[in-house]
Image (cartoon, rainbow, N blue to C red):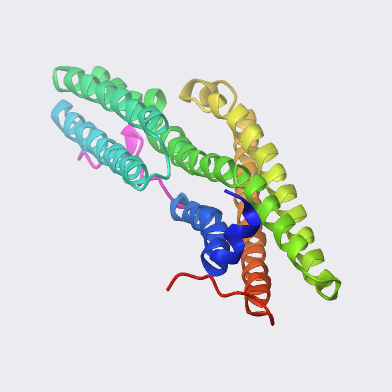
Amino acid sequence: MKIIPTIRRAPQGFARRIGAAGLGIALAATLMLPGTSLAAPRLAPQDSPCPQPVTVQCVITFGNGEIAKRIASLNTLSGKATAQLNANHINSTQAGVITGDVSTNESGLQALQTKLDAETTLAAARADVLSIYTQFRVYIVVLPRDYHEIWLDILTNVQVTMAGKATTIQNAINAVSALKDNDNDGDIATLDAAFSDYQAQLGAATGQINIANGLLPEFTPQNYDANPGGYKGDWTTFHGDIKAAHSDILAAAADLHKIAKVLKELINEQHLAPGATDTNEP
């Protein structure tokens, strides 16, 4: 289908589709901002609410409660991933990474609970409870990492979709430019500037997303234990990159909104100009 005849036939719908194609998806990215506080209160074994003298059963009960909190939090994470999949913000492969991680951690915690429930000595029960914190690190590693990974996946998908609209947008601008008189060069310049910024913002987002994806494998309980300082430094970079990509994509969405608005105005002006033939369908 040729661009100019299409514009003449359906000026409003054409501009509307240009805007909605990317803008709606971009704004969907704001739905998955991770919470600033993911962690539930954590107690070390020595801080457990067991009266003195501490009994094995009290430590077991305390540990079971801590395990239950983590499994509930992991189930919430799985539900968030499923909701984003159902909303078409992430794909099945991306959702599978999160739900697979949830399953792995829940299986590990359940096995630990079975072991804990069978303990007969205070030292062994306390060692099992300590493993909840040192082996799994659900609140300090797993949940922050996985929630951010969902956020990153959404941004990745939005960026790819919006970048894929570049040719359509350029063709629309070219078509409108061919229809206009020199009196409206300012409007064409506005379109060109907005489109140039649109591409620049998406390019910047790509760079930030690539850096964040490169850091993602670093965030494991083992790496946290081996080098907490280095881990936290990488995390700061990772989080900053995702936030920057988010801002870049929203800026590109604003550019797209401007492009759609100007296109619609120019197309309507051309369509209603003296001598123009009204071929819009009712």
Q: Is residue 37 magenta?
A: yes
Q: Position of residue 63 (x, y in %)?
A: 23, 32
Figure check: 121 above or below 255: above
Which of the two residues, 117 or 30, is positioned nearer the viewer here? 30
Quadrant where the image shows the C terminus: bottom left
Q: Position of residue 58 (x, y in %)?
A: 16, 33
Query: Can residue 122 be seen?
Result: no
In terms of image quadrants, where is residue 253? Answer: bottom right
The extreme bottom residue here reads: 274
Q: Position of residue 57 (x, y in %)?
A: 13, 29
Q: Is residue 225 magenta?
A: no
Q: Position of residue 110 (x, y in %)?
A: 21, 24
What secondary structure predominates along the stretch shown in magenta?
loop
Query: Can residue 112 be seen?
Result: yes
Which of the two residues, 159 or 17, is positioned nearer the viewer here? 17
Which of the two residues, 238 or 87, is positioned nearer the viewer here? 87
Along the horizontal axis of the image, is 274 left or right of 181?
A: left
**Residue drawn at the location 27% of the way across and 27% of the way down:** 106
Figure check: 267 above or below 159: below
**Residue drawn at the location 52% of the way across and 24% of the way down:** 225
- Specify the segment rendered in magenta: 35-51
Along the horizontal axis of the image, is 218 left or right of 116?
A: right
Along the horizontal axis of the image, is 164 left or right of 130?
A: right
**Residue drawn at the location 33% of the way across and 26% of the way down:** 100
The number of callouts visible is: 0
**Residue drawn at the location 55% of the way across and 65% of the way down:** 9
In terms of image quadrants, where is residue 195? Answer: bottom right
Figure check: 100 above or below 197: above
